[in-house]
Image (cartoon, grey):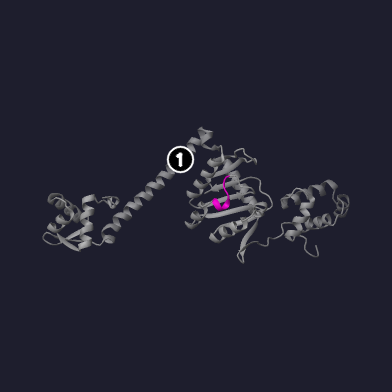
Amino acid sequence: MVNMLDPVGLNSVEELAYRLLIAAVEADRTELREHSGIGDERLAEALRSMEAKGLVREVTPGRYAAVAPDIALGAPLLRRQQALDWARRSLEELTEEYRANARRRDASQLVEVLPNRAAMRERLLHLQDNAREEVLGFCLAAPVAMTADENDAEPAALARGVAYRVIYERALLEEAGMQADVAQAIKLGERARAIPRLPVRLTIADREIALLTLVAHPGISEPTAALIRGGTLMEAMLALFESQWERAIPLSVMDGGLSLETAPCPLDPDDLYLLSLLVAGVPDKSIATQLGLSQRTVQRRVAGLMEAAGVQTRMQLAWHAAREGWLRPGV
């Protein structure tokens, strides 16, 4: 028989006797011996031990009754749980101290290379399964480790209270079935945003450990990634995520579908005027004359507009401005 109550201090003989008393409400030693098959001496010892632990009481000489389990076992179980919690916290503190000291001596403790898709997938799931507070992520088009519908670790993490903030590349949202997957994640509690283009694939757990894809060429070659633990590299990854989060447009679920929320225009009036001239087809030289700037300054400011929009060409900038409603009537 498996001893289920060993964690609260009962041996197998005591547990058997206690269960018999719970079933019978009251019983004397003879009845207990007959139903349990426990020898008289061992039974007597078990009853004395159980009485000392507050599990049973002697109602009449030689006759015993069980004390209610929640009263008899609740307090010991709570004390054991508290002790385990303290031990777990101490273990986490010691582990972090060990890793911090090891990182100063060995760079491999700071960055670990994951050589293939299988290793990346395993680590991505492990990061989420062990996350305590928050998971941050960049999701690019053409996933290399696993697809959104394969990520069964996220729903479980969200269910236990882990916060998710995820930025999706626009091209990924155009892939078949992706919008439905993202909408479902948002319904479960994920905070999601979209952006035209993301620089890297990235997942960060609890601001302590990050998985950064290094090589992800299409084809049969295996992708590689770096597992980053703490240090200035982690600070850089967090700063990169927050900067992209501020630029990205929130996603929400409306009428069962995915919708981009209205985002405020990030351009000031001068940039909007320059953009309106550019979209109207006015040459850079004429724009420079109208604004009282050098042509090089105009080109530099146009490059800044393209960066703000996350695009690479002026045509893409015009399309992005129209789609986002940056060029309102009267501008």
Label 1 secondary element: helix
Q: Residue furthest bottom?
A: 255
Q: 42 above or below 60? A: above
Position in image of residue 72 (x %, y %): 26, 59
Q: 218 above or below 45? A: above
Tell me if 44 is positioned left or right of 297 in this view: left
Looking at the picture, tell me which residue is in the foreground, 225 or 135. 225
Q: Is residue 55 magenta?
A: no
Position in image of residue 227 (x %, y %): 55, 40
Answer few, some or many: residues within 10 Å of disc 1's Cα (few below 14, many 20 plus, some between 14 and 19): few
Q: Residue at x 51, y 33 (%)?
A: 106
Residue 229 seen in the figure: no
Q: Residue at x 56, y 39 (%)?
A: 116
Circle 1: residue type: Glu
Q: Which residues fall within the magenta stretch? A: 145-150
Looking at the picture, tell me which residue is in the foreground, 288 or 3. 3
Looking at the picture, tell me which residue is in the foreground, 281 or 5. 5
Tell me if 312 is positioned left or right of 81 in this view: right
Q: Which residue is mark 1?
A: 97
Snapshot quadrant of residue 56: bottom left
Position in image of residue 279 (x %, y %): 82, 56
